[in-house]
Amino acid sequence: MTNLTDLTLAEARDGLASKSFSAVELTQAHQGAIAQAKGLNAFIRETPDQALAMAVAADERIARGEARPLEGLPVGVKDLFCTEGVESTACSTILKGFTPRYESTVTGNLWNAGAVMLGKINCDEFAMGSSNETSAFGPVVSPWRRAGDDTKLVPGGSSGGSAAAVSARLCLAATATDTGGSIRQPAAFTGTVGIKPTYGRCSRWGIVAFASSLDQAGPITKTVRDAAMMLRAMSGHDPKDSTCADMPVPDFEAAVGRGVKGLRIGIPKEYRVEGMSPEIERLWEAGQAWLREAGAEIVEVSLPHTKYALPAYYIVAPAEASSNLARYDGVRYGLRVEGRDVTEMYERTRAAGFGREVKRRIMIGAYVLSAGYYDAYYLRAQKIRTLIKRDFEEVYAAGVDAILTPATPSAAFGIGEKGSADPVEMYLNDIFTVTVNMAGLPGIAVPGGFDAQGLPLGLQLIGRPFDEETLFAAGQVIEDAAGRVAPPPVWWAA
Ligand code: GLN
């Protein structure tokens, strides 16, 4: 029998249905893999008793013929999601010791679909970062390494732990969130699939807020089909989040094999950024060729305001963050550092509880929202946001069904290699992904090949609002053509 941890989510579902193995065996196999992979620092909190109880219950349901869509399938949860009775910290010191008395809607949906929770997964602090180096639990190490080189690489961020865990076969799938690229960039860095659905497809209730008008939950998985299975279970209307769309959730898996015949795929000329590496250029061309061979029409399109997206994002996101993070004051959650009076207690708590990058965002956010600067920065960024959205609307109105771009400007880099002298160096990672959040559109990252050093590279498909189905259909065409990514050799086993 093949290794249970090598199965895809869909294969594991089928194996459980045919009673080739049990949910308990499947769960224990993944727990064994997690125990061996402490060096990757992907899981920060395991929930072994809960996992086993859920797996036992799943086996009983399967035996009764009452399996739900994800019955008995073990998954990991990014620490940004609140989980009832299980410490949830957003990987920040300020939330250490915070144990929610409620479950986020998205994780609740997963458990209602039968999934098994293995534990909580590392991420950048409050999801602010592109390398998982800002976590209060320390960086996640990517299971991938450059050929002939032991340098420890980042898995991307902020959902770096989710991407590393799926890629290293520690869980069948993981939840993630994406405010400016945090699902798609780590997926691209680790040879996994990640989809950020349309804003409003998943409820944000119970997910620690970063920038509320941009945040969306989504899955990181081994395959496009698995992403469709996960997203279907995670999605759905929730009255507890007024921005969550009251729309039916399609059977995303049914779209996976649909193909791209007759679809028009746009290639935005503004994404051919200066200094783009020939490897990324080749990857993008290969993606176009695969879709064309599968029957799509490739057309050049223009998204003229793309160049303003990154600076505008790094105004809007910190502005919302500074407001969202005001609630961490030492009174209501987690950490408290006492002071002479309440003001000093606030100051000491926030000084000790937030990391460098989070403090930088709070200061930038407070600055761009302050009287006198509001019009010059925040208001202008909002106007740019509208123009970016309009760019996409015009392209789709002209009959384009989806847009193909690279997911990232490079492959994964080494831990400590980027951003320490100049944070903008790190922010540039998000150049191809932030536009999608600014416009509220769905975007998927699918592995498309490897660089010269053997590291995975990802392609991104951007869809019309609430048309994730086209992304699954086109994503599958790319997966079929590029070939499914084999797992990296296991060098980390303890
Ligand atoms: N890297 C981006 C940032 O640091 C996006 C993070 C995210 O999507 N959560 O803001």
Image (spheres, rainbow, N blue to C red):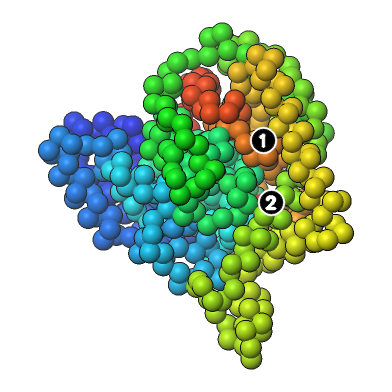
- Give the spatial CA distance, label 2 vs label 1: 13 Å
- The kind of residue tagged 2 is Ala
Picture residue at 38% right of the left edge, 64% below the top: 101
As rendered, which of 418 and 370 lies closer to the eye?
370
As rendered, which of 121 and 64 lies closer to the eye?
64
Q: Position of residue 37 (x, y in %)?
A: 42, 56
Side (left or right) of 326 relative to 164: right
Q: Position of residue 378 (x, y in %)?
A: 79, 50
Q: Which mark is residue 10?
A: none
Q: Position of residue 193 (x, y in %)?
A: 50, 35
**Residue count near mark 1 (Cα–Cα under 10 Å), binned few <14, some 14–19, many ≥20:** many
Q: Which mark is residue 317?
A: 2
Q: Which residue lies furthest to the bottom in this view?
A: 340
Picture residue at 73% right of the left edge, 17% below the top: 300
Q: Where is residue 347 in the image (x, y as percent from the top left)?
A: 67, 79
- State the residue position of label 1: 439
**Residue count near mark 2 (Cα–Cα under 10 Å), binned few <14, some 14–19, many ≥20:** many
Instruction: Give whichever of discs 2 and 1 has the lower sequence position.
Output: 2
As rendered, which of 245 and 441 lies closer to the eye?
245
- The kind of residue tagged 1 is Ala
- Quarter of the rendering containing residue 58: top left
Picture residue at 24% right of the left edge, 33% below the top: 15
Quarter the N terminus occupies: top left
Q: Can residue 487 be seen in this view?
A: no
Quarter the C terminus occupies: bottom left
- Quarter of the rendering containing residue 243: top right
Whether residues under marks 2 and 1 lie with C-beta atoms below 8 angstroms apart, the answer is: no
Mark 2: is the Cβ under 8 angstroms from ligand 1? yes
